[in-house]
Amino acid sequence: MLSAQRIVLAVGCLLCIGLFAHLWRTTPAVRAGLRPQSAHTSRPTDHKATVSTSLPPSSGFADCSHLKGLEDIVFVLKTGATEIYEKLPIHLATTFACATDFLLYSDLEQQFGPLQVHDALALVSEDARDRHEDLAQYRRLKEHVASGADAAELKGERSWALDKWKFLPMIADAYMKHGEEKRWYVFLEADTYVSMHNLLLFLRTLDAKGSVFAGAQVMIGDTEFAHGGSGIVLSSAAVKAFVYAYATDQSGWEEMLVGECCGDKVVADVLLKASPPITVHKAFPLIQGETLSSLDWSEGHWCEPAVTWHHVDAAGIDKLWQFDREWRESKGPGEPILFMDYFDAFINPRLVAANGIMHGWDNLGSDWSFEEGQVESTSYESPQACEEFCREEERCLQWSWSPGLCKAGKAVQLGWALKNRPALGSADDRIKHLAQEDSAKAVSGWFLDRIEDFRNAHAFCDRSLWQSSRS
């Protein structure tokens, strides 16, 4: 029997084929624009017909009529050749179904059906590509594919290390393709979900004419930057300033990248060198890096609109997109979708259906943790002892037990079945690695009465800041 993920991917691919066929048959101007372009081609006059990609809203797969303002945005999706066939199809069927313009960047230039995928690393200087060990994998990748082999065979840490090198040239190249004709540039990764509905409401609170650099703020050293996986929003003025600061010392920025872990951090460094310096507009928790399963459903998120989610697989992207579409159709384009609404739709029904108990499960609680051998609690001795500890703590909403370990939390988190733990990504480091026998014994619980009390105490959220009368 096919897994849910495979079914979603198959459906996504079929939708994409239908979209591509429609595009190819009925849109000759766009079809002409899908021809491969040189990385050094100057920016053409008619951007929409030559450099950007769009899928026709009239194809019938999505009702885009309420999403006013998407024409002001170019979406830029960063992926890799080793994962593109796994992660891109679902975006073409969902995320980009209503997007007026989007650009695709990878570490290999290729055609994806009729769509052009740009090679961001081709824009790194030849000197850097030849000298730095990170980029040796880039050369191996190109040789591997040129031999007729599958890029996915090179999936792993070495290919992931190429990722940091894509950010700077990708941003510069996107501006060369669209310039100031777009008010906003929204940068996404292949496992990022963006709610178009909430994004448009969020952008209306920002000054499109100013130098806006917005995202989920994180720190490395003294540098505050926008986390790339959560999504980065730049106004055209900010991108223009970035391009000037980057082009002024491209070799210097490439040298800096060698010693840095993360390209999104260096994006902030470049913007700090702009004149005047551009700092991060703190957009967390609207732009954030968790999934429905890993998020802590707390007061800090509850009444805010969720613009992005990260580490989302194809099934999760489709689930969120379908919910957003249904919300828009029933509530109208001006009603924001708050974290509370996602909780009511996805999390609470799951907990109620399970009667507050899931076996072979870790719900990620971390406010209390007691391991065997610690003297301050014996809650690790059994599931009953762990549950009793949580019940005695007034603010405890959930508990999780595995042999020799009791954890508990003050905020609701769903978590994962231990056998389905994510191999890499959000919350993986929060789940203890257990032997198969111990995983089977693990159990997680939620106090449904206390969760209902929390829900009732936070039943009202002021949506007026985000509401729009535009249709």
Image (cartoon, helix red, strand yellow):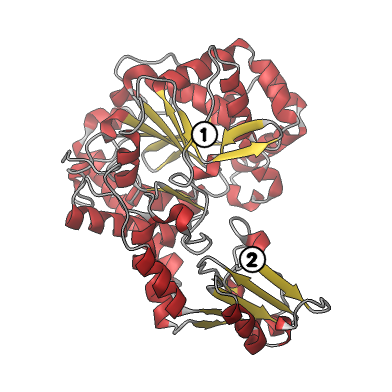
Determine the CA span between mark 2 and mark 1: 44 Å
Mark 1 residue crowding within 10 angstroms, few (<14) / some (14–19) / many (20+): many
> Which quarter shows the N terminus?
bottom left
- Of residues 376 and 89, the one nearer the viewer is 376
Residue 87, visible in the rendered structure: yes
Q: Is residue 113 left or right of residue 373?
A: left
Report the quarter where the C terminus lies: top left
- Give the image quarter of residue 331: bottom left
- Total labels: the figure holds 2
- Identify the residue position indicated by label 2 in the image: 366
Is 262 in front, or is 150? 262
Q: Please tell me which residue lies in front, 139 or 148.
A: 139
Residue 322, given in percent of the width and then of the height, sits at 30, 59
Instruction: Name the residue: 38% across, 21% down.
Output: 178
Q: Is residue 309 left or right of residue 46?
A: right
Which amino acid lies under the numbered mark 1 shown in the image of this protein?
A: Glu
Under tag 1, what secondary structure?
A: loop
> Residue 109, which numbered label?
1
What residue type is disc 2 on?
Answer: Ser
Where does the image place residue 426, in percent across and percent down from the top left? 58, 56
Say which quarter of the image contains residue 6.
Answer: bottom left
